[in-house]
Image (cartoon, rainbow, N blue to C red):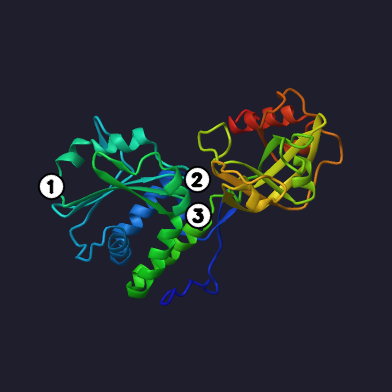
Amino acid sequence: MAGYVPQVKVLGMTDLYLHKHKVDSVFQLLGSQENDITCSIAWAFSRSPSLLKTFLSTVIRWKGNVDNVMIRLQEHETPGGITDIEVEMQGEFYLIVEAKRGWNLPTRTQLERYANRNSFKSSIATIKRLIALSECSPEYAARNLEVREVSGLRIDPLSYRDLVTFAKAAYRDGSHTEKHLLDELLTYLGGIMTMQQINSNKVYVVALAQGVPPGWDIPWIDIVKRKHRYFHPVGGGRGGWPGEPPNYVAFRYDGKLQSIHHVEGYEVFTNPHEKFPEIPEEKWPPHFLYRLGPAFAPSKEVRTGNIYRNGRVWCMLDTLFICDTISAARDLSQRRERGES
C-alpha cells in the first residue's frame, strides 16, 4: 500500500527474547491470546487517530473528528456479559467489537447478549453495530456466522487482515509517533493473523484411515504420502477438531506412529473436488487443507498405546522421540503443561 514503509532494524539495537522467542514488537510482550489481542488493538486505536479514523470510515462510513471517541475494554454489565472492545461517540455511534482467535466466530447467544445490554439498548447513538473480529475470511464469515442480524442490529464480520490494511492506510497520514506504533502493530498482527502457532512444539496426532472411502478414487494414505496434503473440518468447538492450524501434524495407523510433518501452509475449502479430482464434487462444511513438509519420525518404533481407535491427541514434539507409545507422549505432555514434570 502506498505510503507505508516497513520498519527496519536500527544498527546497534539489542535483541530482546521472551521465553526463548525473539520479541519484535512491544505488543508481543502482552501475548497472543484473545484478551492480549483485544488489548493490543484497543491500545492502538486509542494512540493512533489515523488508525481509528480509517477503521471508522471503512466500517461505518464515519468521516468526522475522533477527539471525543471513547474506547472501553472488557466492560462488564449484568445482564450482558463482558464485551471485548466498545468504541463510542455519544449520540453518534456505538460499536461493540467481539474478538476471536483463529477461525472462530461468536455464537448467536453471545451476540444476542451484547445486543440486549442495557447500556447499548438505551444509547441514543445514530449508528449501533456489532463487529465480529477474527481470522476468518469474509467468505467464510458470511457462510458461517450463525446470525447476521440480532435485535435489528447488523453484524459486521472483520478480519485481522482488514486491520493490517487499515494500519497500512493510516501510516500515510500518521505522525512520527503513530508510524512507530503502527510499525509495531503490523509486526504483531503479522505474527498472529495466520493463527498457525508457529512457535508451538506441539504435534497434532491423528489416526489415518486405510482403504478408499466410498465414492473416492484415492485412499487417505495417498493424500498424505503422494500428494503431501491433509485436511479436516475447521473446528473451534465442532467435533473436537482444532480451530487453528497446528504447527506439526503426525499420522498413525497399523498400531503405530508413521510420520510427523511440519505444516508449511494452509487454506480453507468447501468443495473437495476442486482440490482433489479423485473426490466427487460435494458441498462440505469448511475444512482446513494443510500443505505438509517432508516426513520425519523417531528411529525407533512408537506404538499407539492407550488411545481409542479414531482418537486424536496433542503431544509435545520431543515426547514422541523419548516415549515408547503415543499415549505415553500425550500423558507426559499433559503433565508438563500442568507443571508436574
Residue behind mark 2: 103
Q: Nearer the viewer, residue 147 or 68?
A: 147
Regarding residue 292, the answer to whether it shows in the image is yes
Under circle 1, the secondary element is loop
Q: CA distance from mark 3 to mark 1?
A: 35 Å
Residue 36 or 1: which is nearer the viewer? 1
Closer to the eye: label 2 or 3? 2
As rendered, which of 22 and 102 lies closer to the eye?
A: 102
Image-based side of 67 in relation to 99, left or right: left
The circle drawn on residue 60 is none
Of the pair 226 and 332, the residue shown nearer to us: 226
Mark-to-mark CA distance, 2 and 3: 10 Å
The mark lying in front, picked from 3 and 1, is 1
- Residue at the disc numbered 1: 124
Up/down of 98 relative to 113, above or below: below
Q: Residue at coordinates 47% horizontally, 57% vertically from top-left?
A: 189
